Image (spheres, helix red, strand yellow):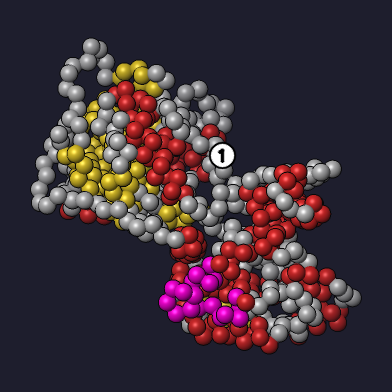
Amino acid sequence: MPTLRIALAQVNSTVGDISGNAAAVRRWSRQAADAGAHLVAFPEMMLTGYPIEDLVFRNSFVETSRRALTTLAADLAADGLGELAVVVGYVDADGPPAISADAVPGTGRRDASALLHRGAVVATYYKHHLPNYGVFDEDRYFEAGDTLTVVRLGGVDVALTVCEDIWQAGGPFTAARRAGVGLVVNINASPYELNKDDVRLALVQRRAVEAGAAVAFVNMVGGQDELVFDGDSMIVSAGGELLARTGQFSEELLVHDLELPEADTTPNASADPVEPVEEMRIARFDAGLVADLSGEPRAGGVAERIEDEAEIWSALVLGLRDYVDKNRFRSVVLGLSGGIDSAVVAAIAVDALGPERVTGVSLPSGYSSGHSRDDAADLAKRTGLDYRTEPIQPMVDTFLANMSLSGLAVENLQARVRGVILMALSNQEGHLVLTTGNKSELAVGYSTLYGDSVGGFNPLKDVPKTMVWQLARWRNTQGDPPIPENSITKAPSAELRPDQKDSDSLPDYEILDPIIKGYVDHDLGRDELIAAGNDPALVDRTLRMIDLAEYKRRQSAPGTKISGKAFGRDRRLPITNLFREGL
C-alpha cells in the first residue's frame, strides 16, 4: 500500500490580507517540504481569511483572490516547492453573486479549495454544503458545488472537501465512498465554542467510516472579530481510529505518515472524467506526484486535551490579541474598579498583549470604597500594567451644579463621566478601550449606555458572571495569581450609590445565569423555564429585562464568542417587539 506523508498547516490568516496570507502559505509549505511531506493542506479561505462577509460581493476582491491563487502556484514552484502538493482555500466565482440582477442559477461566488502542484492549479473544488445557521450566512454569499474533486497523488485517490461538507451527512462523503478514494482532505474554518473539540472528533470518525476512507481535517486558528478559531486538526483512519491530533489555539504543522489503499487503475467504462454519483458528480485529476519517502517514519502524535477553563481562557486571550493586532492598535485601556469583571479583563489583556501594552485607570467617585481602590492598585502591581488614577467626582459635581439630577440619573452620570475619560485617553494616546460587562449583565441590561458600556471590544461579552468567577479562580492557580482574592470574594457592586450591591437590583447570579442560558442560548419559553424548576415571578422579571435590553445590546461592542449562542451574530431579534412570554 502507498504511504503519503501528510502535513496539516493549522495557521492564522487575516481577512483581506491576501498577500500576507499567501506569504504564510509559502513559509509553512517550506516547513512541510523540509519535513518530507508529499501533501500539505491549509484551512478554508486561507488566501482571503474567513469569514469575508460582504467582501464576496466585490468583483475586485474576488479577482484579487483568483489572481493570488495562480501567482501562489507559480511562487511555490519558484521557491523549489513544485513537487509538494498544496491544498489551499480561497474565494472563486463562475458568475455574479446570487443577489445580483444578473445572477444565473447554478453559478455565482464559490467557497473553493484548490490543489497546487508544479506551478499550476491542478484541480479546484467548490464547497457543497453551505451552513446557514448561527454565525453562518453562506446561502447569502455562495453557490453550492455539485461535483466532488478527486486527485490522484502518489498512487492514492484523494478527495477535496470544505468544512460544512463534513458536518452534514451525505453529499461529498457519500460520493467519496462511491468514488473509492483512500483519503478525504477537509479544510476548515470551524469557530470555537466550549467543548466543540469533543463534537469534532466524533464527527470526523463518523464521516471516515461513512466514506470508507481516512480523513485529514485541518482547521484554522486565530481571531476574527467575534469569532475565534481553535485549530484542533486531526487525522482519522478509515475505520474511525484517531491517528494524530494537534493542540488548540496555536499555530502548528502536524506531519504524519499515512498508509493508504492504492487507487484502482482499472479503466472506467466511460472515458468521461466526470462521473455522475447520486446528487454529486465526480471529477478526476492526476497530479503526477511520485510519493517517495525518506528518513525516519513520521507520527504526528495526539495532543492532550485541556480543561474547560483553560480552553475558555485561551480563546479569550487569542480573540483579544488578534483583534488588537490585526486592527493595528498599539495598546488597550480599561477602567479598573477593583471588581471581578475589570480584574479578569485586565488579566486577559496582560496575558494577550503583555503589561506594557495595557493601561488600567482607577476612576473613583465619592461612592468608591477604599477596598475597591486598594484592589485595583493591587491588581496593577501584580500584573505590571500601566496604572493611573483619574478621580471623577469633580467632573460629576460640575454637571450637578448645572443640572438638577437625582436617583438613577446621577448613578448613570457617574458611569458616563468614566466613559468620557476612557474615550478621551483613547483619542489622546491611541488605545483601544476595553469594556468589561459580562454576558449576564448584557442580557438583563445591567449597564449604562454610553457609560460603562463604552469601548471597542468586550472580552467578557459571552461569559456569564458565574463563569467570570470560575475563570478568575482558575487563572490564579496558573503561576503567580494576577487577581486579588478580595476582588473574587467580595459581593459585586457598581458603587454608584451608598452601600450598593448587584443583589439590590438582580437575583443571585447562581439563580439568574441558568434562566439566561435557557432563554438566550436554548430559546426556551416561559413555561419550559418554569417547568425546569425556576420561580415563575423571577422568570417573568428576568425575561422582561432581557427583552427590554435588546436596544442596548444592539449598540454593544463586539466580543469573543465562546458559547453555542452569543449575543450578536448568533441571536438576531427585533428591537421593536411587543411579544412577551406568558401574555
Q: 316 above or below 99?
A: below
- Residue drawn 24% across and 37% down? 120
Residue labelled with disc 1: 133
Q: Quadrant of residue 577?
A: top right
- Where, quadrant-wise, is the C terminus in this rendering? top right
- Where, quadrant-wise, is the N terminus in this rendering? top left
**Identity, as a three-letter code, of the amino acid under mark 1:** Tyr
Magenta residues (range): 471-488
State the residue lying farthest toward the top.
269
* Label 1: element kind: loop
Viewed as shown, does residue 117 lie left or right of 503? left
Q: Is residue 12 magenta?
A: no
Who is closer to the viewer here, 331 or 177? 177
- Residue drawn 56% across and 39% down? 133
The image position of residue 239, as x and y in percent, is: 30, 36
How packed mark 1 is, by other alpha carbons closer than 10 Å (few <14, some 14-19, many 20 or more), is few
The image position of residue 407, as x and y in percent, is: 86, 73
Who is closer to the viewer here, 30 or 67? 30
- Residue drawn 20% across and 35% down? 260
Viewed as shown, does residue 465 lie left or right of 506? left
- Residue drawn 30% across and 19% down? 274
Who is closer to the viewer here, 322 or 476? 476
